[in-house]
Amino acid sequence: MTEPLHLRPATAEDGQSLFEWRNHPHVRQHSHHPEPIAWADHCLWFEKVLTDPNRALLIGESSDQPVGVLRYDMQDSEALVSVYLDPSRLGQGYGTALLRSGVAWLSAHSPQIRTALAEIHTDNPASVRAFEKAGYRKKTVKQDVLLYEYRF
């Protein structure tokens, strides 16, 4: 992956793609709640996220094609990051590019954020590598979850 990513806010038109990506077995496997998501539940969640001023739901695009999603849940000076890719883009470097673009986006759009945090399952080495390459550092380990942080 050599092209820079463009981030844009998610819109209602992204709902179906995000539903499919969120329900992909790879994404579910590494989620805090691995059960498949029902369409009705996804729709409720998606509507809430789009209207919540303390959340940012961003679509990463390369050559005007979506490659993945970043979500920031912001509180005071911290943002909890969630990331997942279009399953057809796995293993192509988009995770790291998306996270790096997200750091730049946070700096420009939410300068009050001083720390970005990520919770990564210990059995997800691809995510660990992506976060480390994007400048996140391991902070703690709790049971089967690693806490990574990026300080601005």
Image (cartoon, rainbow, N blue to C red):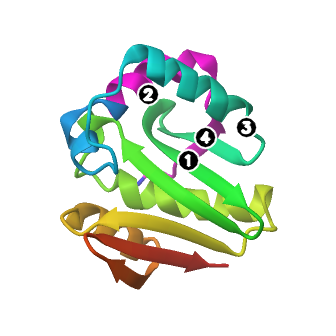
Residue 77 location, x and y as percent?
Answer: 75, 70
| Residue carrying label 3 | 52
| Residue carrying label 2 | 18
Residue 71 location, x and y as percent?
Answer: 56, 47
Q: Looking at numbered disc 2 in the image, what kind of residue is underneath it?
A: Leu
Q: Residue at x 26, y 42 (%)?
A: 34
Q: Looking at numbered disc 1 in the image, what kind of residue is underneath it?
A: Arg
Secondary structure of residue under mark 2:
helix
| Residue carrying label 1 | 71
Residue 133 left/right relative to 121 = right
State the extent of the magenta-drawn residues as a range. Answer: 3-21
Residue 81 location, x and y as percent?
Answer: 53, 58
**How many residues crowd mark 3 within 10 Å: few (<14), some (14–19), many (20+)?**
few
**CB under 8 Å between callouts 4 and 1?**
yes
Secondary structure of residue under mark 4:
strand
Q: Which residue is drawn at 41% across and 65% down?
A: 119
